[in-house]
Amino acid sequence: MVVHDSLLARLHDKTLVVEAAKVGTRWVYNATDGQRFDVHNPSTGVILASLPALSAGDARKAIADAKKAQLSWVKKTGKDRAAHLMRWHRLWIDNADDLATILTAEQGKPFTEARGEILYGAAYLEWFAEEAKRIYGDVIPAHVENARILVLKQAIGVVAAITPWNFPNAMIARKVAPALAVGCAMVAKPAAETPLSTLALAVLADRAGIPDGLFSVITARSGAEFGREVTSNPDVSKITFTGSTEVGRILMRQGAEQIKKLGLELGGNAPFIVFDDADLDSAVEGAILAKFRNAGQTCVCANRIYVQSSIHDAFVAKFVTRVRNLKVGDGFEPDTVIGPLINRSSVAKVQDHIEDAIKQGAVLLTGGSPDGGTHFVEPTVIIGACASMKVATEETFGPLAPIFRFDDVDEVIELANSSEFGLSGYFYAKDMARIFKVAEALEVGIVGVNTGLISTEVAPFGGVKQSGLGREGSRYGADDYLEIKYICLGGQSA
Ligand code: SIN
């Protein structure tokens, strides 16, 4: 297979698209058994490229190479590791247009949004390159005379990463950046729908002089075989996964035998609450952003919009007007705001949520008519949503905005918290006492108050309840790749 012209023609540097996997120190063009899989453009359905469908044996080889590479990498100074990461960062920025083109082609999101994601991903690299020099330990006053207590923070070792298709650049960025910064090596398995973005980063890693073996990218049709290998391979010290709660549970079960350390960024079902003292125009803009970014395919998407009764109709009128103006289309068309969903089963899930809500009495105000056979779904608003509907309990992962009505603060806190998920929550209000009460009461890891955008490399991203374990980004994000060791030095002078 040759990379499709529709992609190549848009690239300044055509060598960024590779039909190969990076297995340890080598680029592998063919699987031993000859198996391959195709990568599609979800807007047009064309096959963009074909990649080797690798096996557990390839992952094992990458892990062995990673183990060797990590032993030298961890000995380098933080400053040296930082310099490597900053060279990679420079190339990431210099090639931002091409990286965004590859991302839009395989994932579908509008080009401007894809470019935003490339810069968001690069920011993790810069942030953790800076942190590489600041992995401080501690000295603790000893418990006995003649002793000293030192606390070291040491790189955990080889890390396996499994990343999703919704943010093919930023999700690997926020794992590989802290891992390499503190002295770990990484073997990554990107989603089969969007591997080209991660492979392009591996090409740039080579150019930046990131040592061979330190960052592998295993291409495979499904994550199951890779998951089994990394949960059972004793040379993998940690697994970091972004994806569904269902798969997170499987990894936990499989990793239990070796007490495998896990970082899990799983599903969400974010409440978005609009109180009666909110600035309605900014609440509408916040809801548009929190709901429709990436066509509703983010773990932090507003899934349930709760609006206080006294302002319900005014909010709905403004919101629906905005939603009707969101242009759906191919991500390369300049005015597209909502791209396609990743596959037909995502489309079917949104359809199912709409139909279920309407059957139970919700009213459709706009959208709701997925375009037969394509991956495009019109942004949809329904009112009269209630707790028994699928939209209340399941993550829709698409451009459907269900609006629920509520009367008072305690009622909405209870409704918002009635979910097994706890990744993010949003609300709009002005009263400070209310702001603190609600922010503290929401059972989530991330709260957006008077904002619909909470993603940044400088803050800790992660959830509570069944939304996961650990935090990514910020100074806390480095901790996930470090072990704490304490040294008790006896025989010292008192
Ligand atoms: C996600 O959907 O998992 C991440 C979204 C983000 O970083 O904003």
Image (tube, rainbow, N blue to C red):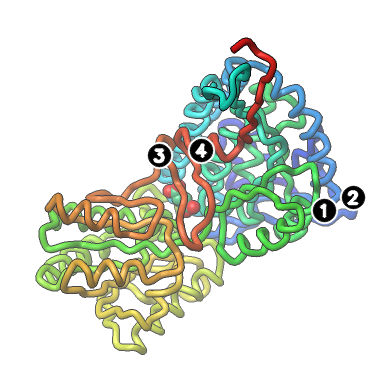
First in sequence, mark 2 or 3: give its number.
2
Q: Residues within 10 Å of mark 1 (few under 14, many from 20)?
A: some
Tag 4: residue type? Gly
- Give the residue pinned by disc 2: 32
Seen from the viewer's position, the closer of residues 245 and 100 is 245
358 vs 348, left or right, is left
Q: Secondary structure at mark 2?
A: loop
Mark 1 lies within 8 Å of ligand 1 (Cβ measured):
no
Tag 1: residue type? Ser
Cα–Cα span, label 4 and label 2: 37 Å
Numbered-mark total? 4
- Give the residue pinned by disc 1: 55
Cα–Cα span, label 4 and label 1: 30 Å
Cα–Cα span, label 1 and label 3: 36 Å
Point out residue 453 in the picture as x, y percentages from the top left corner. Answer: 33, 48
- Give the residue pinned by disc 3: 459
Cα–Cα span, label 4 and label 3: 9 Å
Mark in front: 2 vs 3: 3
Q: Residue furthest right?
A: 33
First in sequence, mark 1 or 3: give its number.
1
Q: Secondary structure at mark 3?
A: loop
220 vs 109, left or right, is right
- Give the residue pinned by disc 4: 477
Q: Is residue 136 visible?
A: no
Check if mark 4's residue and mark 2's residue have beta carbons within 8 Å. Answer: no
Which mark is drawn over residue 419?
Answer: none
Check if mark 2's residue and mark 1's residue have beta carbons within 8 Å. Answer: yes
Q: Residues within 10 Å of mark 3 (few under 14, many from 20)?
A: some
Cα–Cα span, label 2 and label 1: 9 Å
Q: Is residue 173 visible?
A: yes
Point out residue 202 in the picture as x, y percentages from the top left corner. Answer: 67, 34
